[in-house]
Image: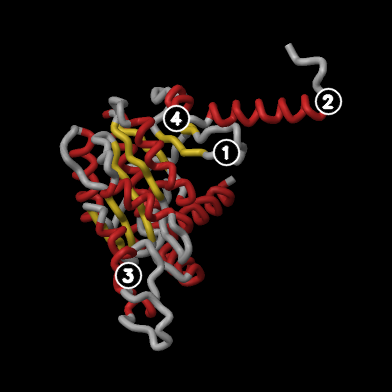
């Protein structure tokens, strides 16, 4: 019972203190362990962190994930074969590697990960998408799922780090440096437009600075940056499409909308690529959607 002798401002401070204690207890490791996720709800999840002090980070199920089949991807056959094999090993309980996919934008890096989920989710594969700013939570995520029977891919899409960002250090620790070791049922798949993920500058290659105000061993900083990509056992690079490869992708997507490829469509597709300044699978799909939409409207 509240002490009637307390002044109103004392009561307010007391209630404030009790709120802070409750928040601290809720955020404690023991409280986090009590939070459980029903992995039968979905096979894809997003790691969400609330800005509120009293709200814990949590796995949010993605009820209708955007999946794609391996047969819908073209011009990346070698990359498909290697990531499929790696994922198959992982799902079967055999040794497999964390994977880093780098290269030209729109060439199928993220789609390839979604294709793996499409192919293997019925065999117990689950995907957890984690944004770059939440990479510090990786140890917590792994702790939440490491005892589960499912196999988990932690997916970091479009990953890159600028000067001053330090989240990559948490990723490095989880990939290879954690004293607790990696969980047998967790792999990390990441995509990036950069080979080494971390911004590199010409100054990084200088052994000495004329003003003598730089690092004594600047090459060590360069090695630290490069070592991040080295910690991925499987590294796949994706290249920009040639004109013929781009048109192959256009043909596949146009036909998926039940339209035929012809010279007129070919000319439109090439003009679309020129206007967008790129030839890739993404640009091909965007053109096919535009073309199919316009054609269907004309048929009404």
Farthest residue in the front direction? 5
Residue drawn at x 81%, y 15% as measured from the top left: 4
The answer to whether 121 appears left or right of 61 in the picture is left
Q: Earlier in the sequence, mark 1 or mark 4?
A: 4
Question: Which residue occupies the foreground of this view, 296 or 285?
Answer: 285
The disc placed on residue 50 is 1
Tag 2, which secondary structure? helix
Residue drawn at x 53%, y 33% as measured from the top left: 56
The local crowd at label 1, few if under 14, some if 14 to 19, many if 20 or more residues have their Cα within 10 Å, is few
Viewer-nearest of discs 4 and 3: 4
Viewer-nearest of discs 3 and 1: 3
Q: Position of residue 113 (x, y in %)?
A: 33, 46
For the residues labelled 2 and 1, say whether their Cβ atoms are less than 8 Å apart. Answer: no
Tag 1, which secondary structure? loop
The residue that mark 4 highlights is 29
Residue drawn at x 42%, y 60% as measured from the top left: 160
Mark 2 vs mark 4, CA separation in Å: 34 Å
Residue 195 visible in image? no
In the image, residue 47 sits, relative to residue 39, either above or below, namely: below
Mark 3 vs mark 2, CA separation in Å: 59 Å
Q: Position of residue 72 (x, y in %)?
A: 33, 47
Quadrant for the N terminus, please: top right
Viewer-nearest of discs 2 and 4: 2
Viewer-nearest of discs 1 and 4: 4
> Could you tell me how many numbered marks the image carries?
4
The residue that mark 3 highlights is 222
The residue that mark 2 highlights is 8
Mark 3 vs mark 1, CA separation in Å: 34 Å
Quadrant for the C terminus, please: top right
Tag 3, which secondary structure? helix
Q: Position of residue 197 (x, y in %)?
A: 37, 61
In the image, residue 210 sits, relative to residue 281, either above or below, namely: below
């Amino acid at each position: 019972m509240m002490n009637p002798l307390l002044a109103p401002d004392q009561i307010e401070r007391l209630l404030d203190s009790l709120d802070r204690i409750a928040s601290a207890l809720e955020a404690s490791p023991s409280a986090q362990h009590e939070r459980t996720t029903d992995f039968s709800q979905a096979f894809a999840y997003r790691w969400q962190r609330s800005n509120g002090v009293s709200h814990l980070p949590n796995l949010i199920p993605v009820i209708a994930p955007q999946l794609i089949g391996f047969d819908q991807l073209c011009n990346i056959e070698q990359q498909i074969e290697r990531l499929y094999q790696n994922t198959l090993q992982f799902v079967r309980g055999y040794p497999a590697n964390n994977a880093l996919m780098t290269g030209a934008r729109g060439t199928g890096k993220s789609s390839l990960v979604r294709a793996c989920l499409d192919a293997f989710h019925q065999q117990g594969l689950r995907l957890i998408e984690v944004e770059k700013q939440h990479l510090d939570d990786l140890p917590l995520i792994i702790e939440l799922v490491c005892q589960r029977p499912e196999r988990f891919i932690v997916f970091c899409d479009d990953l890159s780090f600028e000067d001053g960002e330090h989240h990559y250090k948490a990723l490095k620790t989880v990939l290879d440096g954690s004293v607790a070791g990696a969980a047998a049922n967790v792999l990390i798949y990441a995509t990036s437009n950069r080979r080494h993920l971390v911004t590199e500058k010409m100054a990084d290659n200088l052994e000495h600075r004329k003003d003598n105000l730089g690092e004594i061993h600047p090459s060590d900083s360069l090695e630290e940056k490069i070592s991040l990509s080295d910690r991925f056992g499987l590294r796949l690079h994706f290249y920009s499409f040639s004109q013929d490869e781009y048109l192959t992708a256009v043909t596949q997507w146009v036909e998926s909308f039940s339209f035929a490829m012809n010279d007129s469509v070919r000319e439109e597709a090439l003009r679309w690529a020129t206007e967008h300044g790129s030839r890739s699978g993404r640009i091909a799909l965007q053109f096919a959607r535009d073309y199919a939409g316009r054609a269907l409207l004309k048929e009404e």
